[in-house]
Amino acid sequence: MNIIEITNLRHQFADKSIGIDDISLTVKEGEFVVIAGRNGSGKTTFLRHLNGLLLSDTGVVKIGGISVSDNIQMARQMVGMVFQDPDTQIVGETVFDDVAFGPENLCLDKHEVKRRVIKALKAVDLINMADQRPHVLSGGEKRRLAVAGVLAMEPRVIVFDEPFSDLDYPGVRQVLHQILSLHKAGHTILMSTHDLEKVIVHADRLLIMSKGKIVMDDEPEKIIKNVEAFGVRQPCASRLGMKIESWLN
Amino acid sequence: MCFASWHENRIMAELTVFNFNPKNSFLHKLDARFKIVCFILISIASIKAYTVSLVVLTCLVFYIILTVCISFKSILTELRFFFILLAFIFIARVFIAPDLSASYFKNFSLLWHSIYDAVLVCWRLLFVVLLGLIFVSTTRPSDIRIAVEWFLMPFPFIRGKRIATMMSLIIRFVPLVLDQARETIDAQRSRGVENRKNPVYRLIKLIIPVMYRIFEKADKLAVAMEARCFSEKRTNKALLSGKKDWIVLFGVICLCILLSTIDT
């Protein structure tokens, strides 16, 4: 079943530059899709259409068969978004409060809010830090907290925008492990990155974007050799003709 | 230990006292609304308090600090700049006296009275700050937000929910703004900004990038809140008051009345 259906999506910015240029795409439920491209290729703009943070000029974005522009609230509940900079998306004064922010916005009963918060914190292994201030968490922990904030809204699709930026090696491993657990639990994952090295071995599908268009869309092993033409570095092992290893090994 | 973790530990050390400290003390369990009312009542009582009352109140504050397990060392570190301010206030009260003639310094009773007066003012200020510190470190910021919302509810033209959300975001983002300013100062020092002696030039060079980054972060925050369905119509944690809250409030009222009679 297709969870995301996009038809002829186009987005033009206020300065008349084209952000997204006629994208049509479907994503199956449970797929792990990596979207790569150089800076300014339109990855973030594209992802922001999935939960109605940006609305298209022309074209339709459907999540679970329902148009995003018809029901933005539903789209935001179904598509959780983890942004590049966790510091600017953590709004709570404590870890618990931050995770509760989303469910509270959905006007859920307070017992349900608490249940979801505890479940989400357990899922990202931050339950022992529930009373901590987010500011004192490490980079990897902040990223996991951002994931918990999204998980508490019980989305079917989780979108990660450059999840590994500014993270050290243990931080990357923590976050990667988290993302793979979510995928294993049945979530559809979309991830934008310009660094394929860390994640591509786990992806089902690779999209390459350039100038607002999807220029390549296939299984990673089929197109990985050609990505450098679009400003994306081929993983080291692939360049050397070796098998790409997971960062978790 | 890597620089990042050292930096984090430093931040933790710097921000521990004036933030909520999760513990299980009696004060932690009190309703935030009652705590705010008690805080205001005791602060008002302390404004007119003299030596005996201040000794009673200070002993009470020290006892509370011990029971809620706040380290005296961190309090002293946190309040180091406040002590400098107190020193200025003390000097101003003693030396900027109404009659600064030579006889003022020769007349010991007058001088002694000024010093006594200055000590009382500084003592009262320090007391209110310590009270504030106890309140902040024993009350969840979300409870403070809900209590503020509750107090603003009867006013029809004030958007209590919005004010309370703004307040909680400010509490959340003060450390980030300080970090941002610190980072910009370090970056500019590493490029020799200290060689420029003009303080206005240095201030402008600091404020513009810091403000730019703060507005940029505020914009990203707004988008992130929108992505999580933010609206003013949302579930709020209910504040529950019990018998113990009323008993504490009654006790505080009695204490305030008693203090007002002690020194008069």
Image: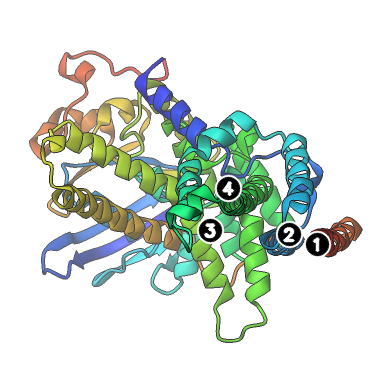
Q: Which residue is mark 4?
A: B108
Q: Which residue is mark 3?
A: B168
In this rendering, would A156 be left or right of B117? left
Coloured how? rainbow
Q: Which residue is mark 2?
A: B42
Amino acid beneath label 2: Ile
Query: Where the C terminus of chain A falls, by quadrant?
Result: top left
**Contact (Cβ within 8 Å) of mark 1 with mark 2:** yes
Q: Of callouts 1 and 2, which one flags the residue occurring earlier in the amino acid sequence?
A: 2
Q: Of callouts 3 and 2, which one flags the residue occurring earlier in the amino acid sequence?
A: 2
Residue A130 position within the rendered picture, expressed as x and y whole percent measured from the top left: 63, 40
Amino acid beneath label 4: Phe
Q: Residue at x 31, y 65 (%)?
A: A54
The crowding category of the residue bearing disc 4, from other C-alpha atoms within 10 Å (few below 14, some 14 to 19, many at least 20), is few
**Contact (Cβ within 8 Å) of mark 3 with mark 4:** no
Pointer 3 chain: B
